[in-house]
Image (cartoon, rainbow, N blue to C red):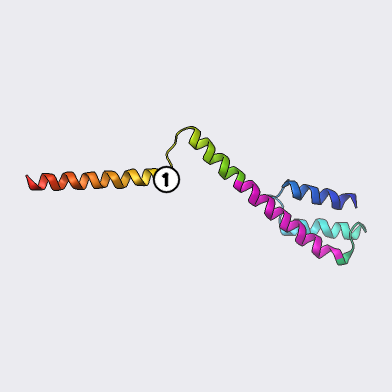
Amino acid sequence: MAMKDLLNNMYSLGVGVAAASKEQIEKTVNDLVQRGEVKRSESNQLIDDLLAKGQKAQENMENMIQERTKQFLSSLDVPTKEEVDALKARVAALEKALSEKDAEK
């Protein structure tokens, strides 16, 4: 059962999540079944569990990267898309007001 535990731990930690495909996981679990480390009746559940853990680890990693990126950009004082959009709208409103003022002259 050491190999099964190792697989669980790897996927819990997110190691190789991006590279691991369903086919790779199925192949590895089937190898465990053939070696007698996992019962055939448990193999589908193990595959589902590993896929779910991998998906969760990937989501956690993506969220962490997104949060760290926001923090990094904020520390550099880079404006957000919303701030840039607000400034664009403000400039457009000022340009319109100026052109209307010029038209009145």
Look at 85% across and 50% down and name the residue there.
Answer: 5
Q: Would residue 28 be found to the left or right of residue 61 on screen?
A: right
Residue named by callout 1? 81
Look at 39% across and 43% down and name the residue there.
Answer: 83
Q: Position of residue 44 (x, y in %)?
A: 80, 65
Q: Position of residue 54 (x, y in %)?
A: 71, 53
Magenta-colored stretch includes residue 60: yes
Magenta-colored stretch includes residue 92: no
Q: Position of residue 104 (x, y in %)?
A: 8, 47
Q: Determine whether 96 is above or below 76 in the image.
A: below
**Boundaries of the magenta span:** 42-63
Q: Position of residue 24 (x, y in %)?
A: 75, 56
Secondary structure character of the magenta stretch overall: helix
Q: Nearer the viewer, residue 68 or 3?
A: 68
Q: Would residue 1 be found to the left or right of residue 13 on screen?
A: right
Residue with the most extreme bottom position: 41
Q: Nearer the viewer, residue 34 or 17?
A: 17
Badge 1 amino acid: Lys
The quadrant the C terminus occupies is: top left
Look at 49% across and 36% down and name the residue there.
Answer: 74
- What element does badge 1 sit on? helix
Look at 84% across and 60% down and name the residue there.
Answer: 30
Q: Determine whether 53 is above or below 83 in the image.
A: below
Other-residue count near label 1 (Cα within 10 Å), few / some / many at <14 / 14–19 / ≥20? few
Q: Determine whether 59 is above or below 80 in the image.
A: below
Q: Would residue 46 be found to the left or right of residue 36 on screen?
A: left
Residue with the most extreme right position: 36
Rendered image quadrant of residue 43: bottom right
Residue with the most extreme top position: 76
